[in-house]
Image (cartoon, rainbow, N blue to C red):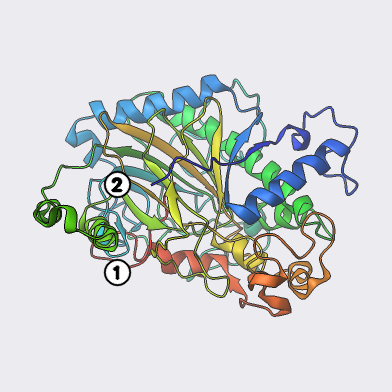
Amino acid sequence: MSSSPTLPQIDISPFLPSSNSPSSPSSPSPSLQQTQCATQLAQACETHGFFYLTHHSVPETLTTHVLQLAREFFTTSSPEQKNKIRRTDPGVGSKGDGARGYQVVGDNVTQGKRDWHEAIDWYRPVVEGEGEGEEKGEDITASPPRNSTRTEPEPFSQAAQKDNKRRLVPSSPPPTSNTRPQRTPPFPLLHGINLWPDHPTAFRSVYQIYIREMLALGTTVVRAMGHALELDDPETFVKATRESFWVMRAIGYPPLPELEHGHGRRGQEKGNEREDDDAETESQEKENTDPLSCGAHTDYGCLTLLLTDSTKGALQVQHPPSQSASSTTTTTTTTSSSKWLSPPPLPNTFIVNIGDMMTRYTNGLWKSTLHRVVHRGEGYRVSVPFFFEPDFEARVGPLEECVRRGRGMGRGMLGGGGRGGGGDGGGGNGKRMFGEVKYGEHLVGKVKGNFHGGGEEEGDEG
């Protein structure tokens, strides 16, 4: 594992709605500051797929509180309090939908192996205004005062309930303007209700304020990405995420257990005669058999905004990424030219990475990057990744501008070169490397394999 090169830092402030830039955030003619930001963002997504996001305007008091509440839940809640919101398989009990809720250490599976963390998962709610004590008709994607502490409702899609031609959740009858979907258990996969802990008492209200901030920030970043790719319509990703089927996790990582390996003893017996390739093979064997806090994976959707505590050395990012542009199937191969780097957490900064849908949109010009979590240090690590995803019904396929880049017809920031340029196979050399998928169907297939006993798919974690 390497501590260098470090991740690039992107100052996103030129694209914030409150920016004093001469050009508005959604203007088709970007300002000089926006152009500079977009150029840096394009380079970061081409070369790393990961970057630090700075000057994002999310209050540090809020992010600190979010991490504190997660730590308090994981470290002080009783087993009974945790089990009250336990994730269960679809159709099991009165709340289970196979995805939402609390998971004990070992519930999550990545590459067929059980991960060493506990977590709570939330998804965009299925029904507008659903939840006890909530005011029907409000929308969490609205922009109430930042300091508001009231509990917000959980809409899935207001637009869909007004348009009975759209079906946001597979096998659910499209709601009409006068009816709401039937919401009685048992729930099919992803159709359930978000489960919130009673302890700490402020948990839900603070996290729902945080969700609003993340939705706004996610929109800002994908808008900047539209400019970074020099799309004919720079609002392309904004339009595809207006009803983002977001996912949020609060994750607790106890230190990995210490295991004894025969590898080291065998190495000592060989003494000075041990060859370097033997040592490398031994290290890889050990890596493949050791438990991981979260195994190597890429993320499913567009964008991950990772909030993490100050624990160093746990998050590991593969660099340069080894994933082929012709496939979105995760591989855990680490070659001599591809190593793990461990970006240290920075104060008041998010670690951001692009996901598989952005790889598909860009036809491989930007590639989702393998990453994993290996927490062998002391203390209890906490992170809260927010996955800013396409709409459930969004159809995702290569954008024509990105296909053209692969033909060497790029211009400006991308220019057909860099990571994924026409020369190394990225961008498909002018060919469409991916078909079109409906994001919701893609997500359902992934979630089915997320948990022990549910199959062997890669995980989705930051």
Mark 1 residue element: loop
Indicate the amino acid at tag 2.
Ser
Q: To which residue does mark 2 refer?
A: 293
User: Going 17% across and 58% down the picture, which residue do you hit?
Assistant: 273
Indicate the amino acid at tag 1.
Gly
How far across and how far down the image is residue 182, in percent? Answer: 45, 59
Q: Say above or below: 67 vs 247.
A: above
How far across and how far down the image is residue 181, in percent? Answer: 50, 59
N-terminal of the pair, mark 1 or mark 2, is 2
Q: Name the one closer to the observer, 213 or 108.
A: 108
The residue most toward the front is: 272
Mark 1 residue crowding within 10 angstroms, few (<14) / some (14–19) / many (20+)? some
Q: To which residue does mark 1 refer?
A: 455
Mark 2 residue crowding within 10 angstroms, few (<14) / some (14–19) / many (20+)? many
Whether residues under marks 1 and 2 lie with C-beta atoms below 8 angstroms apart, the answer is no
Q: Name the one closer to the observer, 457 or 43.
A: 43
Q: Name the one closer to the observer, 179 or 341.
A: 341
User: Going 65% across and 60% down the picture, which residue do you hit?
Assistant: 419
Query: Which quadrant would residue 213 be assigned to in this image?
Result: top right
Q: Say above or below: 403 vs 86.
A: below
Q: For residue 374, which numbered disc appears in the image?
A: none
How far across and how far down the image is residue 364, in percent? Answer: 63, 67
How far across and how far down the image is residue 270, in percent? Answer: 12, 57
In the image, which is nearer the foreground, mark 1 or mark 2?
2
